[in-house]
Amino acid sequence: MGIENIFALLGGLALFLYGMHMMSINLEGIAGNKLKSILEKLTANRFLGVFVGAGITALIQSSSATTVMVVSFVNSGLMTLQQTVWIIMGANIGTTITGQLIALDVGLIAPLIAFAGVVMVMFSKSKKLGFIGGIVAGLGILFIGMGIMSDSMLPLRDSQAFINLMTTFKNPFLGIMAGALFTAVIQSSSASVGILQALALSGLIGLDSAVYVLFGQNIGTCITAVLASIGTNRNAKRTTVIHLLFNIIGTIIFMVICMTTPFVSVMQSFTPTNPAAQIANVHTVFNITTTLLLLPFGNYLAKLAILILPDKKKETVEDEDRWLDEIMNSNYVLGTSILAIHYIGQEIAEMYKLVYENIEMSFDLLQNYDEDKFEKVKMNEDRIDQYNYQSAKKISKVLSIEQSYKEVKVLNDFFRTLTNLERIGDHAMNFAEYAQTIDKNEWDVTDAARNELNLMKNDCLNGLDIFRHDLSKEELLVKASSIEQIIDDSTSKYRSNQIQRMNDHVCQIETAILYSELLSDYERIGDHILNLAELHTNLHELQIELSQGD
């Protein structure tokens, strides 16, 4: 095998992997949010779970992507461990579609398929047709890469050393180890099965050896989910254990079948002239049979995973943050937006609690200054700023991945919600600093001003309270508008009162100036509450639509 063959092999592999990647990305794009919402709302029905797992994996051409998404959903609490069993079983069936596509003898028209897809991508103004074109082009490129790989390996038929190596795979354990190791390295069972098919088409490996490599490839594909589960909670790790158990049990069963029955000969007889189809058929039979055998015992697989990985420590917010960062930085984007919306929604809720607490404490400080309480407000303000920064970063990361219009709208509204909450937090911090200044300089605050401060506190808290109730869109907006108007009217009234107190010489000039600044902060809080109400109603409607699919 010369250097030109090696270059051809690498080039063919590159085209094969790129074609698969194109199909996966474009299939996900055309499927939109419906695939994600189906998984998110999945019931405990095992047959539905298998069907959904198989369908989604067949569409996105990657059981690894489906499994990583399932792991992430379990980690975030959007799916139970028991639901994942059926999804994983289905994913293993769905991943066999790539091998069946490769087995199609379309080498001569592969360039035409790729050309047709590229024409659709280049000249179509419709986004949907562009996705379809990407799928067609990816399929054509995949077939071209497959043909190049197969042709480049033809000279190896004359290499005795390579023939001896392929012969060793007749040993079940060596074949399984080789398949598992190779698939773990490239992190794609579809790709490794495709390469195995290329070897078979070149006459370099027979089905009697290929079956054991194939079984190992099913085990090796679990490595992606195992790596993705690093840093996740206990249930998410158990999901990867279920994936491993499924493929290990299936491998043991089929290894015994191959060693004790004429299984290989039977599979060869269906397509005697097409080695690629033989491998694809074995792959399909392996996963369907294993699923049918284990389907009645799915709940026991979940219990076994719990026994293998018992409960340990309580998960922390930092663990979740690290997990979401890892998912967003991975190669798998399916389900990322749901995770982002879930986690960022939680962070907004935490920000809201801190803002509410700071508004309450800061007005208390204006009435009765306490250094410990001031430090508590300051600490809360630091946490509010941290939530704002971290959540904004996550939103930016997710927006860098192509999402549906509704998902982009939700994330943008989340960003504006963060901004409004952070600014209310800033105004609360201003109140606390005004209180510190008054206490430090021993300035007097009149009883009339103290009464007004109590009324301001009630207005601000009443405004924030409306988000704690399950109000209709109209009720929420009416209440927010009413409170914003009350704050505007009160601001005008309190300014007039303060000017009168200055004219009557019943307050210090320094206190009057500071009080004027305080009224400006108070008035802006009303504006932010109205902004939040408008965003809240928009988000509620969008999230309902997203849960129902595009």
Image (tube, rainbow, N blue to C red):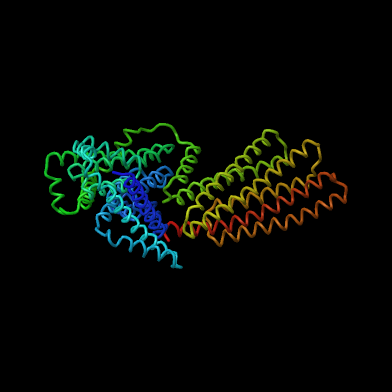
Q: Is residue 45 visible?
A: no
Is 414 on the left or on the right of 297, as rendered?
right
Residue at image coords 36%, 54%: 19
Q: Quadrant of residue 416?
A: bottom right
315 or 161: nearer the eye? 161
Is 92 on the left or on the right of 500, as rendered?
left
438 or 313: nearer the eye? 313
In the depicted structure, whether residue 549 falls above or below residue 353: below
Residue at image coords 23%, 41%: 159
In the depicted structure, whether residue 110 falls above or below residue 77: below
Residue at image coords 71%, 44%: 430
In the depicted structure, whether residue 412 falls above or below residue 343: below
Q: Is residue 380 visible?
A: yes
Residue 330: percent from left, percent from top: 44, 45
Residue 55: percent from left, percent from top: 31, 55
Residue at image coords 76%, 57%: 492
Name the image quarter holding the C terminus. bottom left
In the depicted structure, whether residue 168 falls above or below residue 86: above
Name the image quarter holding the N terminus. top left
